[in-house]
Image (cartoon, rainbow, N blue to C red):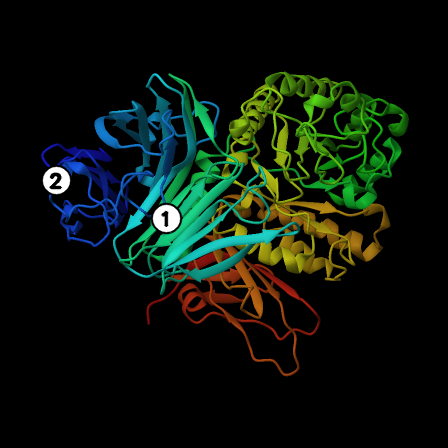
């Protein structure tokens, strides 16, 4: 059993292959956290210490014992109003206007298999691959019940946490804050790794010391956002890629989130992950339940690389679903940077014809094929094919593309509406707008209230009517603004943003069930909704609207700490780059884009003969490496924010092959030699460079490294394929 309960001391132990997570129900019924870390084989309740701490409150159950205070004890699910003045995981506003919830242990149940969360994405496994622990807590006065859910994937070294809050009392309550996971650390000085950014520059790596006080990151934008990603790492100060202790917390949610790291008065650290509390005051009537999105926990005592690989495997195998979960993805050409809004059906066919000659598998018709949509100021919501613009029906266009040996895909943005649209003129109340106020626009568009089922149903039927017209094998789902006017004409205001996200999930679930063979790629202005929640429905997400190869190196570096390469949409685009104006060689652009689901974002009919030949070779090379890239172990070999080169590699699980990728980021006169040390090889094996034929000792490549050539141009890239060809002879 992965989950054990010792009834004598009322201690729960959650055991994975390399970790243990322990908690204890104490004599007052409070659920205290004991330990999370490398595997242990004994109870850790000796770690709890009791002292009289000045100005730290004592629950009435403790009587005159001033040494017992929730203000200093580690807890599994701390609540507001119980004498713990640190950050709380739960805040309940009661019918009597009090803010308090006294949760005590009631019961527990251990089950075979992993729990599910109706209406929400979550880690999924076969029944024999996981166990579930359900712990029921209750407030005896308000009758609020909180069910803590723990999923244990023993072989994956993954523990998941979620929470269900049920109002079993007779009066309405309001949930004003709700998290799904809390980690309390008794001691130690920690760093926090978080991933900040902006549109076209997402998931920048940031490592900061957790100091006394409360450090908060999150999103108030209605999406997980470009600005912060809902995934963090808490690490010892000495932890590196390959050594040291670190803890990961990944929220499986695509809306507003909040993460808090607090170092308290006694040097203890608390980390909380959950829903964004701003604009959140969720009413629960008698019998109603609020489910908090799941947090995926992971621990490593051997550095960030091990933590990342565990998350990669978990998300690839136990979050992603459907036909393309472990299947090769088509190399695609997107029309956006090739033609923007200015295309016809003939334009698309010409792109497809040329792309087919290059070995590309699919052409995607991006924004501009529907309604009165000649720019980004009109037409959203009118999901009818503009046959006049295309010069044919959608079915005819799809057939023409298919006849060229190419797959065909389209772009949609279902959540949005333009004021200049037939839909808005007919149903202005369907857009999120605060009555009596002028709207806040983003990209000159408004947001449809997807918390309302009738609106979702209408848009779903319109999209289905389009998809049913022809052989469409790919859909890119975009979302190009943040939500500002948080208001619903139907739903209670404090629940709008949460119900909006559940509405998105409802729509997407119906979509993937109806169209299981369509490859759905997520997008929100690129990487504005790059999260594990979206990956439950779309196995790949457009990583960023920034296609500049050098910027992409840093974006993809941050992304790699949690998300597998198979989820990263990455394309080669034209130069000078449309976002930065930078020019980088086609070879370097190709090497960078191969760290993801490969494709192109340029006008293939404007290529030179030399570029044509090189792209044909790039496509052949990618298809050769594709399985290794998608399924292999990914290693970060440098930090592109501090090093003068960027290096990463893919190594096969059986260590028989590897692909090293390097881009030089600096070029100076008389430079020093850079040496990159490889990982994931067999130490006693001999590897051969497939291109040069040169042979290397596996141990030497990992211990001494491989010297890099001095750059003779700006941003040169190197790609080395290694194949195991023998064993080292003993001296």
Residue nearest the viewer, comparing 652 with 111:
111
What residue is rendered at 53% in x and 39% in y? 256
Outermost residue toward the left in this view:
8
Q: Secondary structure at mark 1?
A: strand
Which quadrant of the figure contains the N terminus? top left
Residue nearest the viewer, comparing 397 with 300:
300
Query: Residue 506 in the image: x percent, y percent?
Result: 55, 23
Which mark is on residue 63? 2
Outermost residue toward the front in this view:
96
Does residue 538 sit above or below 553 in this rendering? above
Residue bearing the label numbered 1:
271
Q: Earlier in the sequence, mark 2 or mark 1?
A: 2
Query: Residue 408 in the image: x percent, y percent?
Result: 74, 31
Count up the numbered dots: 2
Does residue 413 sit above or below 584 in this rendering? above
Does residue 341 sit above or below 644 in this rendering? above
Which picture quadrant has residue 390?
Answer: top right
Query: Residue 404 in the image: x percent, y percent?
Result: 80, 32
Q: Secondary structure at mark 2?
A: loop
Does residue 499 sit above or below 80 in this rendering? above
Between label 2 and label 1, give the one nearer the viewer: 2
């Amino acid at each position: 059993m992965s989950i054990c309960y010792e009834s004598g001391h009322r201690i729960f132990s959650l055991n994975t292959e390399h970790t243990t997570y322990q908690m204890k129900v104490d004599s007052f019924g409070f659920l205290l956290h004991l330990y999370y870390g490398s595997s242990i084989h004994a109870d850790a309740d000796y770690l709890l210490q009791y002292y009289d701490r000045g100005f730290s409150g004592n629950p009435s159950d403790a009587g005159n014992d001033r040494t017992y205070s929730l203000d200093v004890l580690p807890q599994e699910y701390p609540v507001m109003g119980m004498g713990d003045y640190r950050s709380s995981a739960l805040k309940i506003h009661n019918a009597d206007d009090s803010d308090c919830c006294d949760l005590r242990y009631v019961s527990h149940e251990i089950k075979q298999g992993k729990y599910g969360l109706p209406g929400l994405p979550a880690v999924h496994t076969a029944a024999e691959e996981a166990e579930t622990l359900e712990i029921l807590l209750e407030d005896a006065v308000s009758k609020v019940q909180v069910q803590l859910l723990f999923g244990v994937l023993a072989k994956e070294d993954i523990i998941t946490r979620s929470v269900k809050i049920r109002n079993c009392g007779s009066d309405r309550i309001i949930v004003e804050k709700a998290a799904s996971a809390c980690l309390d650390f008794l001691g130690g000085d920690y760093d926090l790794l978080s991933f900040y950014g902006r549109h076209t520059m997402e998931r920048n790596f940031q490592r900061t010391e957790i100091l006394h006080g409360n450090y908060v990151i999150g999103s108030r934008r209605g999406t997980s956002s470009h600005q912060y990603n809902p995934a963090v790492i808490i690490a010892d100060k000495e932890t590196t890629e390959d050594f040291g202790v670190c803890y990961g917390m990944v929220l499986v949610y695509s809306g507003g989130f909040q993460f808090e790291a607090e170092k308290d008065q006694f040097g203890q650290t608390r980390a909380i992950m959950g829903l964004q509390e701003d604009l959140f005051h969720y009413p629960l009537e008698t019998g109603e339940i609020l489910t908090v999105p799941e947090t995926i926990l992971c621990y490593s005592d051997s550095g960030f690389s091990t933590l990342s690989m565990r998350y990669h495997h978990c998300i690839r195998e136990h979050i992603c679903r459907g036909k393309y979960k472990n299947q090769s993805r088509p190399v695609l050409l997107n029309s956006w940077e090739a033609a923007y809004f200015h295309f016809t059906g003939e334009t698309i066919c010409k792109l497809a014809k040329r792309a087919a000659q290059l070995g590309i598998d699919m052409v995607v018709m991006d924004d501009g094929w529907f309604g009165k949509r000649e720019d980004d100021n009109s037409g959203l919501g009118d999901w009818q094919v503009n046959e006049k613009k295309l010069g044919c029906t959608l079915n005819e266009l799809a057939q023409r593309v298919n006849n060229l040996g190419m797959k065909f895909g389209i772009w949609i943005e279902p959540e949005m509406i333009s004021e200049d649209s037939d839909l808005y003129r007919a149903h202005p109340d369907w857009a999120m707008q605060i009555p009596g106020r002028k709207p806040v626009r983003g990209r000159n568009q408004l947001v449809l209230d997807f918390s309302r089922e009738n609106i979702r149903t209408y848009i779903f039927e319109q999209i289905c009517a389009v998809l049913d017209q022809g052989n469409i094998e790919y859909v890119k789902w975009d979302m190009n603004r943040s939500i500002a006017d948080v208001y619903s004409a139907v739903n209670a205001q404090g629940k709008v943003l949460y119900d909006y996200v559940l509405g998105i999930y409802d729509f997407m679930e119906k979509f993937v069930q109806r169209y299981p063979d369509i490859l759905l790629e997520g997008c929100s202005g690129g990487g504005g909704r790059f999260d594990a929640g979206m990956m439950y429905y779309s196995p790949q997400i457009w990583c960023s609207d920034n296609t500049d190869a050098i910027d992409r190196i840093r974006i993809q570096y941050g992304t790699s700490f949690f998300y597998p390469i198979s989820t990263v949409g990455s394309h080669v685009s034209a130069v000078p780059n449309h976002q930065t104006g930078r020019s980088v060689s086609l070879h370097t652009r190709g090497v960078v884009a191969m760290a993801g689901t490969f494709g192109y974002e340029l006008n293939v009919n404007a290529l030179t003969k030399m570029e044509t030949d090189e792209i044909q070779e790039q496509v052949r090379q990618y298809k050769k490496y594709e399985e290794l890239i998608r399924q292999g172990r990914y290693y970060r070999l440098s930090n592109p924010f501090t090093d003068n080169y960027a290096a990463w590699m893919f190594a096969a699980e059986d260590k028989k092959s590897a692909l090293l990728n390097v881009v030089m980021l600096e070029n100076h006169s008389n430079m020093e030699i850079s040496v990159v040390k490889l990982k994931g090889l067999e130490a006693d094996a001999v590897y051969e460079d497939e291109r040069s034929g040169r042979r290397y000792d596996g141990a030497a490549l990992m211990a001494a490294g491989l010297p890099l050539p001095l750059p003779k141009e700006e941003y040169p890239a190197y790609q080395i394929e290694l194949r195991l060809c023998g064993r080292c002879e003993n001296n």
